[in-house]
Image (tube, helix red, strand yellow):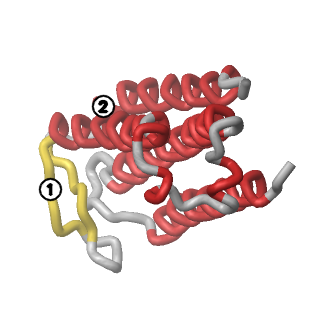
């Protein structure tokens, strides 16, 4: 049986950091938050502080929950719908439960990455709305946050493919 304690702990830590930062930064946001920006970092969309924080919380809760729910429910869909290296080997009756548990474990890691991404996006919004200054989104900041998320996702995919490419 695949152990879920480490990825569950990582996800819990990510959520503590996420909720703590969003709650702590609430008062740092102006009542009207610049929340969407053009390519040069100039604001072109606005939200109230409450809607912005609610959207951030929704993003940080719903996206990871959908990922985990989809992987947890993978055993209920036909095998032909599953795209996995050596699918027939891994989803054979004698290995199916172990393979589904591995997918669940990987989904918890991806969920953690998504929570960190939502945290990074919120950090960018807070930094883009400084007090007593016009709002501006940092191009370097969005590049770093998005780049880190894409790199992390690439590493996640690499590990997932490496695991399922092996036939033991």
Answer left or right for 34 relative to 156: left
Which residue appears at 63% of the width and 57% of the height?
87
Q: Nearer the viewer, residue 93 or 50?
A: 93
Determine the CA span between mark 1 and mark 2. 16 Å
Q: Nearer the viewer, residue 95 or 18?
A: 95
Which type of secondary structure does the marked residue at label 2 adopt? helix
* Place of residue 135 in the rendered image (x, y in percent of width and height, measured from the top left): 28, 60
Q: Earlier in the sequence, mark 1 or mark 2?
A: 2
Quarter that holds the N terminus: top right
Residue farthest toward the right in the current orientation of the protein: 168
Which type of secondary structure does the marked residue at label 1 adopt? strand
Task: Name above or below for residue 71 compared with residue 83.
Answer: above
Res. 10 mark: none
Res. 26 mark: 2
Q: Is residue 157 in view?
A: no
Answer left or right for 14 relative to 24: right
* Place of residue 82 in the rendered image (x, y in percent of width and height, measured from the top left): 50, 56
Q: Nearer the viewer, residue 3 or 98?
A: 98
Which residue appears at 42% of the width and 45% of the height?
118
Q: Badge 1: how crowded within 10 Å, few (<14), some, or many (20+)?
A: some
Q: Which residue is mark 1?
A: 46
Residue 150 found in image quarter: bottom right
């Amino acid at each position: 049986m695949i152990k879920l304690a480490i990825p569950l702990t990582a996800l819990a830590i990510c959520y503590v950091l996420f909720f703590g930062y969003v709650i702590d930064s609430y008062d740092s946001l102006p009542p009207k938050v610049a929340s969407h920006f053009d390519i040069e970092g100039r604001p072109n969309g606005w939200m109230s502080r409450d809607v912005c924080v609610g959207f951030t919380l929704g993003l940080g809760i719903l996206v990871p929950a959908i990922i985990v729910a989809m992987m947890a429910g993978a055993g209920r869909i036909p095998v032909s719908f599953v795209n996995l290296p050596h699918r027939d080997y891994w989803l054979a009756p004698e290995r199916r439960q172990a393979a589904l548990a591995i997918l669940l474990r990987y989904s918890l890691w991806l969920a953690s990455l998504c929570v960190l991404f939502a945290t990074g996006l919120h950090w960018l919004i807070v930094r883009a709305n400084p007090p007593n200054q016009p709002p501006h989104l940092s191009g370097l900041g969005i590049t770093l946050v998005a780049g880190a998320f894409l790199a992390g996702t690439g590493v996640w995919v690499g590990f997932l493919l490496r695991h399922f490419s092996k036939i033991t």
